[in-house]
Image (tube, grey):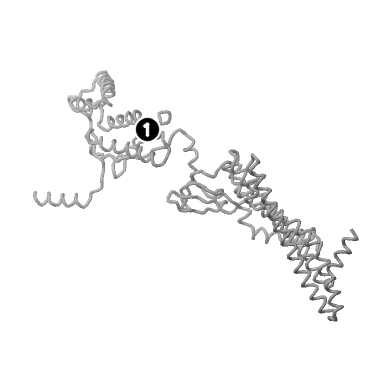
Amino acid sequence: MEDKEELLTQLSCHVHDWLLNQGYALGTAQKINLLINILVVGVFIYVIDLILRTFVVKFFYSFTNKSKTTFDDYLVKSNFPKFVAHIIPFILIKRLIPYVFVDFPTLETFLLKATDIYLILLIVFILRSIVRSIKNYLRTTDRFYDKPLDSYAQVVIIFIWFIGIVFIFSELTGYSIVKFITALGAASAILLLVFRDTILGFVASIQTSTNDMVRIGDWITMEKYGADGDVVEINLATVKVRNFDNTITTIPTYALISDSFKNWRGMQESGGRRIKRAIFIKASSVKFLSQEELKKFQSIQAVQQYIEHRQRDINKFNTEQGYDKDLNIVNGRNQTNLGVFRKYCDLYLQNHSATNKDLMIMTRHMAPTPEGIPLEIYVFSSDKRWENYERIMADIFEHIIAAVPHFDLEIFESPSGSDLQNFMKNRQSN
């Protein structure tokens, strides 16, 4: 070891001694010797670093091609081999600095500190690449693909950088790490203020993951932020939602905890997607049905058996109670065109090929409004895909709306300009 050190000392001072023999001043000889040593060592280190980077990267590529796991592939993509390849050149630089700057002790001390800082940064980059590789690898697994891994990875990387900065500060100032952390404790209030969003985002990420509130790929709706689409990314500060118009909405992660939002995952995992929409029946078109009208409606095959069965029960009840229908049709019980139409809608939905028969199927009255009587259709489509869902819903309501006049009913519509014009013309003609 001593022979190697003596040899390095002689090589680093060879030019210096030669210049002194040539009659150069001591200061000039030292500076020229320093420049030549820096040039020689710089070229040597660059060549070594280039060779090692090429060798290590090729080794990793060949290893990943033979390996069955994909984790090493993500290590290569995160530049892990390149960072590792810098370790040996760093060791060489650390060893050669005392010989290159032997005549400049102040500069030697400064560069030794700089190399120590470089080592800290190199370790940070290596650990960061490992964390990113783990995150990307876990995202390919079924267990973790929909978890907010970005948030956890960012927290770990922030912690690594924090430890790295503590070591760098200790290296620059000479203070112990314990003193530095103690000083940070005194400034904790300022740190909490600075990292407020980061802390809230981290807590929110843990809560959403623990309670399984949001996953990557979920369809969520959050009107406050104009979000209506699929979650594509969950990180420490924000949640990115790709809306159905292909715009991107960014939501603060902690807003998922503090504000309300709608997650459609339950619908997507269920047996159907709900259709809940009403048509407004004009109240003045609702009426009791006479025997002639009942016979006419019996020609509609879907409700034929219903009308016959229902009318037998009504006739039996009216006879037992002594109601006289000849005096007034309102006496006793009667069937209405709206009641028959409501039953027709129920039967139509139950026989429709695209509705889920295992989930609720219902046609119901809502409270009357100035626009008429809302008749609501409540059913679930068996196909949950958006475009098919819209087609199924349109097919159902197109049929129902077209069937309304066949039951002597009318759909309420606000008067249009042409309606008012026709009204005025009829009034003037009369």
Is 290 or 398 nearer to us in this picture? 398
Query: What residue is shown at x 26% (from left), y 40% (from top)?
Result: 411
| Image position of 215 (left or right of 125) | left
Local secondary structure at mark 1: loop
| Image position of 177 (left or right of 230) | right
Outermost residue to the left: 429
| Image position of 106 (left or right of 70) | right
The kind of residue on which mark 1 rests is: Ala
Q: Is residue 107 above or below residue 344?
A: below
Q: Is residue 280 above or below residue 8?
A: above
Q: Is residue 416 above or below residue 194?
A: above
Hey, which quadrant is residue 94 in on the image? bottom right
Residue 271 image point, x, y percent: 45, 33
Q: Is residue 183 above or below residue 247?
A: below
Residue 429 image point, x, y percent: 8, 50
Query: What residue is shown at x 42% (from left), y 39% (from top)?
Result: 385
Name the residue that disc number 1 marks: 354
Hey, which quadrant is residue 402 in on the image? top left
Count the marks: 1
**Quadrant where the image shows the N terminus:** bottom right
Instruction: Work out whether residue 367 can be spotted.
Output: no
Is 281 or 96 nearer to us in this picture? 96
